[in-house]
Image (spheres, rainbow, N blue to C red):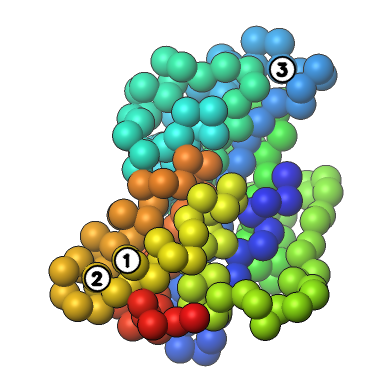
């Protein structure tokens, strides 16, 4: 899974309290997916109990697209992946610790800044099996939206948040028609993969770096 790697992170020294971590749990299709829905329900319960800022089953959507945790559990299948976003490294650590104890035999993918996530994973006694790294964006990058817009749109792993939508939300936040939290919730409402980090979005919208005038 690499679609969580391409988040355009607006990390600066003034953002030292910024945090963005994703956990995905899934079965390997054709290998250990038979009966995996039972284990995926357990994984969902574990992640939901660790106070994530977003949570979803990519087959159905997430807690900001109209689903509930109980609803997701009822509909979960062996083909699902469960995604959770954390804005607190401690909560991520607790989630991984409980997943390790549960030993469900499923794949667990963690996305975050390597210097933060790798020691954290090893610190709870888990081994790192595979590492994927993003090498950035290549080509005619002048055609890309500005960095603050990309920081919002790239938080949806399926690319369902368009630059135009991000600009519209930023414009309404800037004019006072929406609060930064309301703007973040509106953006999250179209992210069915559940990888949108509301805390990061609210931070960006609060700072006013994302504007409706960006082109």
Q: Residues within 10 Å of mark 1 (few under 14, many from 20)?
A: many
Determine the CA span between mark 1 and mark 2: 5 Å
Q: Which mark is residue 172?
A: 2
Q: Which residue is mark 3?
A: 33
Place of residue 38 in the rendered image (x, y in percent of width and height, measured from the top left) = 56, 15
Of the two numbered discs 2 and 3 on the same chain, state the one appearing first in sequence.
3
Place of residue 180 in the rendered image (x, y in percent of width and height, measured from the top left) = 26, 69
Determine the CA span between mark 1 and mark 3: 40 Å
The residue depicted at 52 percent of the width and 89 percent of the height is 13
Determine the CA span between mark 2 and mark 3: 44 Å
Residue 55 located left or right of residue 125: left
Picture layout, residue 201 above or below residue 194: below
Note whether residue 99 is visible.
yes
The residue depicted at 49 percent of the width and 59 percent of the height is 162
Q: Residues within 10 Å of mark 2 (few under 14, many from 20)?
A: some
Of the two numbered discs 1 and 3 on the same chain, state the one appearing first in sequence.
3
Tag 2–tag 3 contact (CB < 8 Å): no
The outermost residue toward the bottom is 13
Q: Nearer the viewer, residue 48 or 210?
A: 210
Tag 1–tag 2 contact (CB < 8 Å): yes
Q: Residues within 10 Å of mark 3 (few under 14, many from 20)?
A: some
The residue depicted at 45 percent of the width and 82 percent of the height is 214
Residue 161 located left or right of residue 128: left
Q: Which residue is mark 1?
A: 169
Mark 1 or 3, closer to the camera: 1
Note whether residue 203 is visible.
no
Q: Nearer the viewer, residue 24 or 189?
A: 189
Q: Nearer the viewer, residue 187 or 27?
A: 187
| Image-quadrant location for residue 74 | top left
Q: Secondary structure at mark 2?
A: helix
Picture layout, residue 65 above or below residue 3: above
């Amino acid at each position: 899974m690499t679609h969580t790697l391409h988040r355009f992170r607006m990390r600066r020294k003034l953002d030292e309290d910024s945090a963005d971590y994703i956990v995905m749990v899934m079965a390997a299709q054709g290998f250990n997916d038979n009966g995996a829905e039972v284990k995926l329900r357990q994984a969902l319960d574990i992640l939901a109990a660790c106070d994530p800022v977003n949570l979803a089953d990519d087959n159905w959507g997430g807690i900001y697209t109209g689903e509930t945790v109980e609803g997701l559990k009822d509909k979960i299948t062996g083909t699902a992946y469960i995604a959770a976003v954390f804005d607190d490294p401690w909560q991520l650590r607790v989630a991984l610790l409980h997943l390790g104890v549960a030993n469900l035999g499923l794949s667990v993918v963690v996305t975050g800044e390597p210097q933060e996530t790798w020691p954290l994973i090893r610190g709870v006694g888990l081994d790192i099996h595979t590492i994927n790294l993003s090498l950035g964006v290549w080509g005619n990058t002048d055609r890309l939206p500005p960095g603050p817009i990309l920081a919002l749109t790239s938080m949806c792993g399926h690319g369902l948040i368009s630059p135009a939508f991000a600009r519209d939300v930023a414009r309404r936040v800037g004019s006072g028609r929406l609060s930064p939290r309301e703007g973040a919730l509106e953006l999250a409402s179209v992210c069915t993969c559940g990888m949108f980090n509301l805390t990061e979005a609210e931070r960006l919208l609060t700072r006013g770096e994302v504007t409706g005038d960006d082109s």
